[in-house]
Image (spheres, rainbow, N blue to C red):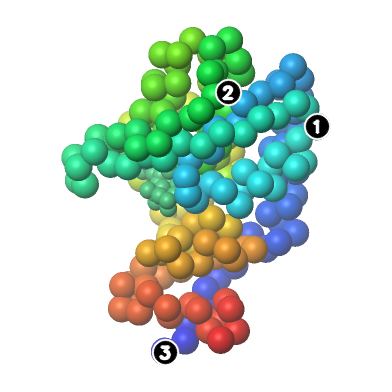
Amino acid sequence: MAHTPEILLGQDELSAVVERLGRELSERHDDGVVMIAVLRGSVPFLADLVRVMTIRTSVDFVALSPYTPGTGRVRLVMDVATNIEGKHVVIVEDIVDTGLTSAFLIGELQRRNPASVSLCTLVDRPARRVVPVPIDHTGVQIEDRFVIGYGLDHEGRYRNLQVLAIADPTVLAEDPDAYVEALYGA
Ligand code: PRP
């Protein structure tokens, strides 16, 4: 059965959010910055964000995974290639939920003596927080709702949507493709 999700942020609203964040980052780091994106959900956000930034910017990537599912421990499975010592670093996340991923990564990067580490997330869902995490730049704060699109997925689906949409997790549990028809027209 086809379902239609509620659009949380359409294309224009997303562009406005990304432009604001790009401006904030450019004003704060006018001597350049290393953007470190957490694979895979942050890729669309990173790509748009760096293109509205007006300062020297390099990009790099990390991949993280829970050490053992359910333990809450996080493991670095792919490291950056950049030597970040003495550099200003911005972690780019699509979403901060429990905070475990970001808290781990901030600690990991800080051990490498960068000039600074800050955190920029498109979405903040504070209701799910387990550990406190300092977010320096937030796109949008949401209630405890499940969101898809613009990098955010359900079982790998929906990442390439140009909007952020609210999905019903019980609908997706029954049929992961429940929103495909409404969102992709097929
Ligand atoms: C998501 C998101 C963050 C993390 C946030 O990644 O991209 O990295 O979860 O969750 P937390 O605050 O509870 O730690 P996910 O593991 O879904 O991987 P993905 O980006 O490849 O979808």
Spot the residue most to the right. Answer: 54
Q: Position of residue 143 (x, y in %)?
A: 46, 52
Residue 118 visible at all: no
Among the two numbered marks 3 and 2 on one chain, the one whose residue lies closer to the N terminus: 3
Q: CA distance from mark 2 to mark 1?
A: 16 Å
Among the two numbered marks 3 and 1 on one chain, the one whose residue lies closer to the N terminus: 3
**In this rendering, would 174 be left or right of 114?**
left
**Nearest to the observer: residue 12 or residue 56:** 56
Quadrant where the N terminus sits is bottom left
**Residue pictured at 71% horizontal, 21% vertical:** 32
Callout 2: few (<14), some (14-19), or many (20+) C-alpha neighbours within 10 Å?
many
Name the image quarter holding residue 156: bottom left
Residue 1: mark: 3
71 above or below 174? above
Say if disc 3 is inside 8 Å of ligand 1: no
Residue 68 visible at all: yes
On the image, numbered disc 1 is attached to which residue? 54
Name the image quarter holding residue 161: bottom right
16 above or below 177? above
**Residue pictured at 69% horizontal, 42% vertical:** 49
The secondary element bearing badge 1 is classed as loop
Name the image quarter holding residue 71: top left
Q: Nearer the viewer, mark 3 or mark 2?
A: 2
Q: Position of residue 131 (x, y in %)?
A: 33, 31
Residue 89: mark: 2
Q: Position of residue 179 (x, y in %)?
A: 48, 77
Q: Position of residue 170 (x, y in %)?
A: 33, 72
**Residue pictured at 35% horizontal, 79% vertical:** 175
Task: Inspect the image, locate mark 2, and give the three-letter code of the amino acid beneath it.
Answer: Val
Tell me whether the residue at label 3 lies in contact with that at label 1, contact meaning CB atoms closer than 8 angstroms.
no
**In this rendering, would 4 be left or right of 57?**
left
Task: Inspect the image, locate mark 3, and give the three-letter code of the amino acid beneath it.
Answer: Met
